[in-house]
Image (cartoon, rainbow, N blue to C red):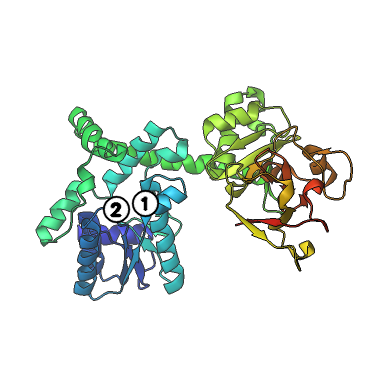
């Protein structure tokens, strides 16, 4: 196995020899075998380990084991401690997604800080085959069917030619100790269901299933390369990056010349799916975007918000999503010596006797009216205020307003307060609202 391992690295030019790389080591059998092979091959490396604190006692046991492993090979080790559960909750991700994000962000930080030539992970052929079926079950484009790539940016996977069976046999031959993650046997996770139920059934139906699946994966990787050769020029033609960090995508472009005659909605949808996929829009949302005609109509992904605007789609990051409401601090102060002109944009002050507590933040809605500071009589639609002040569509969608218990509008946050609630010479108590 060692000779095949070295030959594969050299033939595929997976990473430059002689330069130190970073090994992601969990302590499981796959990463332990990877560490032994790298050491036996003479490649210089350091080890990185993540303690996610998800399995009581096991995670600390794994960390101790990996520290001892690094010491036995005489190599540097980096260890990160994560409160993964809190991160998953705060970022609205599954535990698996949160752990993956934390893990790879940490590895990339180490790579940059210590100038490692690559990040090496222990994914093998079975992992790649399982990933194909996971993506197939979840629904995916062509890119989801190519399995795990041997090189993806700075991440390299030199064990992909080897099966789990070969890795276990090598560990046994070399008497390599390792730790077991108790969750690997649980059928609560979709990957484990694929691993322990679907794959054994496929092998029963076709003993050579693993290799034939991998051959199909290899063919799909080649097809995807050809496919991206067509998509990339179109992406450059349709996508514009704006100075305000929004992304402007033309929806008016036809299919490329060789496909004009087909007039196929399916092909057009596939093209825009590929263009919008980096912003986390799924196929059904893309279909809704292409079918929509109402200017200003809004669409959401897990990371971005998109707005229709005269034949274009404007996309901005998820912090502008209307569900994101910041915290509010309310304070009562004396008017003596108080100057409302000295307030920062994220803080406003009101005459306490003119409002009804409690106060809360919400997003504006059609029909909202208020009396802007300085307007002695009458009211104005907030939508008209937006037009008068040349709000962009993303700004309209993200704008917060502060209201009291009667839903009286006190403040277009960061912009304008309400005239009836202003501080005057008659004000005896002041309430301030601060956005954090």
Q: Choose between 209 and 343: the one closer to the eye.
A: 343
Answer with left or right where residue 16 lies relative to residue 74. right
Q: Residues within 10 Å of mark 1 (few under 14, many from 20)?
A: some
Label 2 and label 1: CA atoms lie apart by 7 Å
Of label 2 and label 1, which has the lower sequence position?
2
- Pointer 1 residue: 85
Q: Quadrant of residue 73?
A: bottom left
Work out whether residue 167 can be spotted: yes
x, y percent for residue 120: 34, 61
Seen at 35% across and 37% down, the residue is: 134
Answer with left or right where residue 190 lies relative to residue 92. left
The answer to whether residue 293 is above or below residue 277 is above
Q: Choose between 112 and 234: the one closer to the eye.
A: 112
Tell me, yes or no, whether the two marked residues, 2 and 1, touch with CB atoms within 8 Å. Answer: yes
Q: Choose between 143 and 97: the one closer to the eye.
A: 97
x, y percent for residue 15: 38, 64
Q: Choose between 277 and 125: the one closer to the eye.
A: 277
Answer with left or right where residue 109 lies relative to residue 179. right
Q: Quadrant of residue 81?
A: bottom left
x, y percent for residue 313: 68, 39
Seen at 77% across and 49% down, the residue is: 421
Seen at 49% across and 44% down, the residue is: 225
Total numbered labels placed on residues in the image: 2
x, y percent for residue 373: 83, 50
Q: Residues within 10 Å of mark 2 (few under 14, many from 20)?
A: some
Quadrant housing the N terminus: bottom left
Which labelled disc corresponds to residue 357? none
Quadrant housing the C terminus: bottom right
- Pointer 2 residue: 54
């Amino acid at each position: 196995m060692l000779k095949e391992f070295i030959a594969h690295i050299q033939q595929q030019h997976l990473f430059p020899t002689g330069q130190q790389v970073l090994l992601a080591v969990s302590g499981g059998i796959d990463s332990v075998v990877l560490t032994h092979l790298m050491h036996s091959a003479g490649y210089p490396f350091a080890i990185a380990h993540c303690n996610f604190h998800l399995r009581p006692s096991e995670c600390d046991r794994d960390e101790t084991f990996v520290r001892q492993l690094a010491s036995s090979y005489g190599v540097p080790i980096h260890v990160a401690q994560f409160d993964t559960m809190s991160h998953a909750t705060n970022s609205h991700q599954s535990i698996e997604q949160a752990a993956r994000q934390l893990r790879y962000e940490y590895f990339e930080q180490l790579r940059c800080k210590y100038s490692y030539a690559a990040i090496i992970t222990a994914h093998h052929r079975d992992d790649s085959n399982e990933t194909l079926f996971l993506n197939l079950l979840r629904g995916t484009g062509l890119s989801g069917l190519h399995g795990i790539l041997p090189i993806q940016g700075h991440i390299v996977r030199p064990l992909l030619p080897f099966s789990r069976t070969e890795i276990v046999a090598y560990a046994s031959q070399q008497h390599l100790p390792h730790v077991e993650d108790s969750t690997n046997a649980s059928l609560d996770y979709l990957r484990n269901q694929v691993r322990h139920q679907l794959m054994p059934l496929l092998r029963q139906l076709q003993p050579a299933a693993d290799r034939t699946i991998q051959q199909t994966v290899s063919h799909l990787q080649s097809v995807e390369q050809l496919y991206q050769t067509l998509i990339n020029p179109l992406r450059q033609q349709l996508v514009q990056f704006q100075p305000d960090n929004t992304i402007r995508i033309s929806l008016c472009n036809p299919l490329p010349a060789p496909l004009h005659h087909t007039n196929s909605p399916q092909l057009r949808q596939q093209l825009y799916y590929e263009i919008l996929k980096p912003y986390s829009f799924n196929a059904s949302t893309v279909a809704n975007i292409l079918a929509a005609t109402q200017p200003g109509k809004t669409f959401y992904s897990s990371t971005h918000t998109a707005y229709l605007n005269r034949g274009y789609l404007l996309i901005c990051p998820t912090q502008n999503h209307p569900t994101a409401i910041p915290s509010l601090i309310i304070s009562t102060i004396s008017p003596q010596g108080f100057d409302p002109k000295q307030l920062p944009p994220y803080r406003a002050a009101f005459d306490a006797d003119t409002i009804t507590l409690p106060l809360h933040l919400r997003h504006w809605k059609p029909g909202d009216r208020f009396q802007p500071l300085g307007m002695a009589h009458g009211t104005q639609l907030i939508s008209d205020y937006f037009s008068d002040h040349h709000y962009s569509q993303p700004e309209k969608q993200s704008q917060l307003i502060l209201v009291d218990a009667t839903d009286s509008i006190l403040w277009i946050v960061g912009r304008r307060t309400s005239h009836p609630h202003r501080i005057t010479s008659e004000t005896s108590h002041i309430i301030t609202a601060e956005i954090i």
